[in-house]
Amino acid sequence: MTYRIRRSNGPAGIVYEVSGEMDAEHASCLEALVEEEGGSILLDLNEVTVVAREAVRFLARAEERGVRIAHCPDYVRSWMAAEKNTTDSF
């Protein structure tokens, strides 16, 4: 699987540009990076091609914690909402 994370400092905080296929291992790595950072974080998913369920769960948790997500594919956004609804019902 091809996967890349590029970190930069933007005017509104730290930006992580994510590209490629995002599986559980990649989501775990990204989660560790996000947790180490302080302040405002933006995840740019413009170049993400495939997202696994574990990655969707990470993205939903991250967004709930205030991480902004840009260029999120519509199917991922829908899946994040469905995952949130699933966890809210338990």
Image: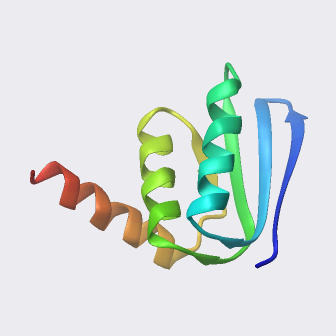
Q: Is residue 11 left or right of residue 25?
A: right
Q: Is residue 49 above or below residue 69?
A: below
Coloring scheme used = rainbow
Q: Residue furthest left?
A: 90
Q: Is residue 42 above or below residue 49?
A: above
Name the spot of residue 60 as percent of width and height, x first.
Answer: 43, 52
Q: Residue at x 67, y 59 (%)?
A: 26
Q: Is residue 87 above or below residue 19?
A: above
Name the spot of residue 57 as percent of width and height, x first.
Answer: 42, 57
Q: Is residue 51 left or right of residue 79?
A: right
Q: Is residue 29 left or right of residue 6?
A: left
Name the spot of residue 74 as percent of width and height, x first.
Answer: 51, 75
Q: Residue at x 79, y 41 (%)?
A: 15
Q: Is residue 53 above or below residue 34?
A: below
Q: Residue furthest front?
A: 25
Q: Is residue 19 left or right of residue 6?
A: left
Is the N terminus in the top left, top right, bottom left or bottom right quadrant?
bottom right
Q: Residue at x 41, y 39 (%)?
A: 64
Q: Residue at x 44, y 70 (%)?
A: 53
Name the spot of residue 22 as percent of width and height, x first.
Answer: 65, 68
Q: How many marks?
A: 0
